[in-house]
Image: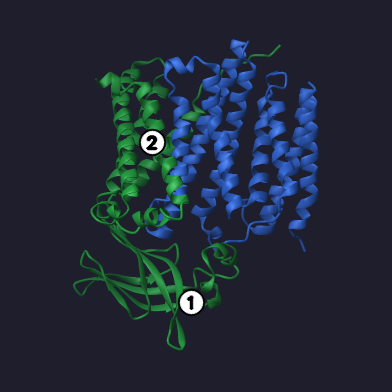
Chain colours: A blue, B green
Amino acid sequence: MMSEAHLFWPYIGALAAALAAAFLAWTGRVRAARWTGLVGTGFCAVCVGLIIHLTNRPPLFGLLESFISIAFLLGLAAWRGERTINLKGLLSKRFWTLISLILLSLLFLPRRLNPDFYMYDYPWTVLFFVCRLTAVAVLLSASLYYLAALEAKNSPDLRGFLFHQGRIFLILGGAFFLAGEFSGSVWSLNWLGDFWRWSRGFFESTAMFLLISAAFHLPAKWAVSTTIRAVFGAAPGLLIFGLIIIHQLME
Amino acid sequence: MLNRLSSLTFTIWSLASLILSLAFGIGLAFSQTYYPAIRGINETLVWDWLRGPAWEDPLTAGWFMVLCAAALSLFINLAACTITKLVPRLNHRDRFRSVLLLTVHLLLILVMIGHGTALFTGFKYEEIKLLPGRSRELPNGLSVKLEEVRFTDDVALLQADQRSARRLFTREAFHRRSNTARVLVARQGREIAAGELRILEPLKNGPLRLTLTGFFIKKQGPREQIGVNLALSSNLLAVFFFTCYGLLVVGYFLLALSARRPEIVSAE
């Protein structure tokens, strides 16, 4: 009989590989970091597969499900990040440090699957959570690109490339975020009778969408500053991740 | 004037004021003192709330007015920017992206209009708590009658507080398709809609929507009775809103997919 205890060893495998990838990236062995990271992402994929097998649904909510899912998606983004371009680990070291921290935090938190809430068989509910978690991972990837651009201050080409890639991640993250909000609106309409509620969740989501929008609409005199651009580009990902953690801890 | 209203500086300050207003709203929703007032906004149409209950708590009402003013300033900026910047951009070399960008902004305008008009049109009555056989007359002349409740799961579930309900209401313990309520909506005795309701499966008749939001248990003398919590609403623009919102999501994905790939560089 399979249980959530079976998640432990693939999780440990993912954590070990992520830590090794972060170490290799920080010590300049970017190629080795990529391949080690891919192994870690593979272990995360096994965890995601096990969660689906155990619960008959994708990872949706709760620290274990969210963190594993986000780590898996970040791992894919990290693999893509320096696939064709040698960025001397500018991205790898950030991605694998963040993934390591996310996975490491699970060592000290309860690694339990979320109770199987009765609405988890409703497609709009599932879509809401899946899009929200994907948005968090994509927006966090954008944050890492923008933060990497800060380190590339003396190389305008590289900085421009990182900003541009970060912007694409930000738009994609915004798209997933909006898709989640759309699903949430349908869910809310059929559950509570209205397509949005005046609540903390609604205020947070709207503020998040506006924050993503702000990064695309900086006045010219602000946009010339690498630091201001990086801060605005990195903020949505870091903030939404913080909010996710707060929400899960308050449950 | 139009140029000033469409400037990015105005955009960023409008966004900042709206984000700060929302942050204040988060604070109000967190506070035990103001949470009931925030929750109260949902119980009726916002226009009805503004004409009465809102002013029982002036801070929440004042905050709401500031929030609306900030949203209005962003709306004006969005419209002005679309006219002065995005329409002329259509002659730009990259026509597809220019059209896409314009479309996304127009859809956002329509979504904001959908949100805005929902505050003032139709009607909404929440927290209609009924026991079997009872009915409720609503201020707009409609009445809702609960004819029968069928609850097949353990009634102990209904005694759980909101926090533990999340853990207890599992798919195994609560079967949402088996638990139903038979209801009737009428206007001056004439039936408008009737049928069986389930959670997440509202009763619809045109824009009218009767939603079963939950079950409750009440002691009636020596025995316990199971009742339901209903929401009756009508929003003429719901279809319009969801169409625009859906297209906006598609537009956003297309924007991401159509982004020009930057030239490949190396850190070396």
CA separation in Å, label 2 and label 1: 44 Å
Q: Nearer the viewer, residue B207 or A251?
A: A251
Relative to A185, say whether B111 is above or below: above
Q: Quadrant of residue B172?
A: bottom right
Residue labelled with disc 1: B151
The mark total stands at 2
Image quadrant where one finds the C terminus of chain B: top right
- Residue pictured at 47% horizontal, 33% vertical: A211
Left or right placement of residue A164 versus residue B48 in this view: right
Question: Dot 1 falls on which chain?
Answer: B
Mark positioned earlier in the residue sequence (2 or 1):
2
Q: What kind of element bears circle 2? A: helix
Left or right placement of residue A73 versus residue B151 in this view: right
Q: Position of residue B160 (x, y in %)?
A: 54, 70
Q: Name the amino acid, label 2.
A: Leu
Q: Position of residue A82 (x, y in %)?
A: 69, 24
Left or right placement of residue A162 versus residue B46 in this view: right
Q: Name the amino acid, label 1.
A: Phe
Q: Position of residue A94 (x, y in %)?
A: 69, 28
- Residue pictured at 55% horizontal, 19% vertical: A227
Left or right placement of residue A229 versus residue B143 in this view: right
**Label 1 packing within 10 angstroms: few (<14), some (14-19), many (20+):** some
Q: Nearer the viewer, residue B66 or B198?
A: B66
Residue labelled with disc 2: B18
Q: Nearer the viewer, residue B200 or B8?
A: B8
- Residue pictured at 40% horizontal, 57% vertical: B36
Q: Residue furthest bottom?
A: B222
Observer-side mark, 2 or 1, equals 2
Q: Nearer the viewer, residue B143 or B44?
A: B44
- Residue pictured at 44% horizontal, 67% vertical: B214
Task: Return the mark for residue B159.
Answer: none
